[in-house]
Image (spheres, helix red, strand yellow):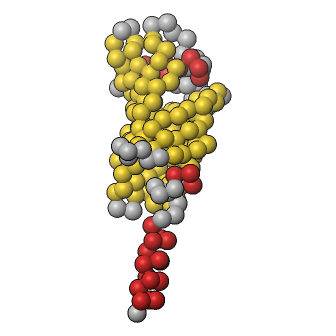
Amino acid sequence: MKILLSLLLTQIWVSVSFAQEYKPVDEGSAVAFEIKNLGFNTKGSFKGLDGKIVFDPNDPSKSSFDVTIDATTVNTDNEMRDNHLKKESYFDVEKYPKIRFVSTGCSGPDKKGHYTVSGKLTIKNTTKDLNFSFIATRLGDDYIFKGDFRINRKDYEVGGSSTISNNLSVSLTVRAKKA
């Protein structure tokens, strides 16, 4: 009986303590940004999440993120502005329809439950290092990943206008369904 119980507990531990594969989905997700334009806060969002997430909350070093969003879905609730953002001087969506983040490492959690992911963010044809913290919340078999970061749009050759702030905030809520 002890052997059977031991085997059963080992099987349960193994099934919950290794990296699992997940697929990011739009349902329950939000990829939002905020930037100052003519001194006013302008908000926008993207849809079209895709990719592969491997996540192990017990050993984050085994985790990896390769996630894209569809740049053609940029939405600021202003169709004229959205069409302008899709043009060559901004996101150039005809040539570069995807924005991609590929992780190079993951660590944590800290005492507050925050993980840290390091990786490469590619917008248009420019790739830069990016590190940010996030919280991972289990939702049944799925996960919700929430994080925030700031980037300089000029680092990615996005927009030439001097009426727009160089820095913008990005807020992520990514629902990832177990693959």
Q: Residue at x 36, y 56 (%)?
A: 138
Residue 107 versus residue 43: which sits nearer the camera?
107
Is 143 situated left or right of 117 in this image? left
Instruction: Residue 158 in the image: state x and y as whole percent.
Output: 56, 20
Residue 105 versus residue 83: which sits nearer the camera?
105
> Up-down: is 64 above or below 81?
below
Would residue 94 be visible to someone looking at this image? no
Instruction: Residue 171 in the image: state x and y as whole percent.
Output: 40, 33
Q: Residue at x 46, y 25 (%)?
A: 150
> Up-down: is 88 above or below 139?
above
> Up-down: is 141 above or below 162?
below
The number of discs equals 0
Residue 64 versus residue 59: which sits nearer the camera?
59
Q: Residue at x 49, y 14 (%)?
A: 166
Would residue 39 be visible to someone looking at this image? yes
Q: Residue at x 40, y 93 (%)?
A: 1
Instruction: Residue 113 in the image: state x and y as whole percent.
Output: 38, 46
Q: As drawn, which residue projects farthest toward the bottom?
A: 1
The quarter holding residue 34 reads top left
Is 45 situated left or right of 157 in this image? left
Instruction: Residue 103 in the image: state x and y as whole percent.
Output: 58, 43
